[in-house]
Amino acid sequence: MLPEHAERIPVSTTTFARTRVAFVAIAVAAGLTLGGGAPAFAAPKTYANCTEVQKSWSGGIAKKGVTVNKVTKSNGTVEKRKLKGTVKTDTALYNANAKLDRDKDGIACEKS
């Protein structure tokens, strides 16, 4: 109860609606900040074999900075060749699929 000398201040329904919207916005922001939302980065895809990789990236997956394919010839010499096909350059994706890089030249499932 209000004392007799207190004034009643009229409050519109829009003020209550604005307050409710602000409260909900703050609650959502706090939930996302405290880990209630989706992860910021998804883990890179891991492929089972090179056939699967080449369905998406015909030239394989390369580490950032790799610009040539190093091919070891039958006589033991190493030849640098231009990359063939569509090569995805992504170090995180390469690291997730490094087991598919048989010659360890920084390109998994490359076309030679």
Image: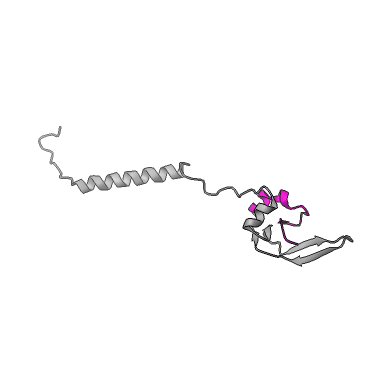
Asked if residue 9 lies left or right of residue 86, the reply is: left
Give the camera-side residue of 8 and 40. Answer: 40
Residue segment shown in magenta: 93-112
Image point 72% across, 59% down: which residue?
110
Image point 87% across, 60% down: which residue?
74
Asked if residue 57 lies left or right of residue 42, the reply is: right
Instruction: Residue 15: tell me if it is visible.
Output: yes
Within the magenta stretch, is there residue 111?
yes
Give the camera-side residue of 1 and 14. Answer: 14
Image point 68% across, 58% down: which residue?
60
User: x%, y% of residue 80?
Assistant: 79, 65
Give the camera-side residue of 110 and 106. Answer: 110
Name the outermost residue toward the bottom: 82
Instruction: Residue 90: tell me if it is visible.
Output: no
User: x%, y% of residue 44?
Assistant: 60, 50
User: x%, y% of residue 13?
Assistant: 20, 46
User: x%, y% of residue 14?
Assistant: 22, 48
Within the magenta stretch, is there residue 74?
no
Give the camera-side residue of 26 and 4. Answer: 26
Asked if residue 88 lies left or right of residue 112, the reply is: left
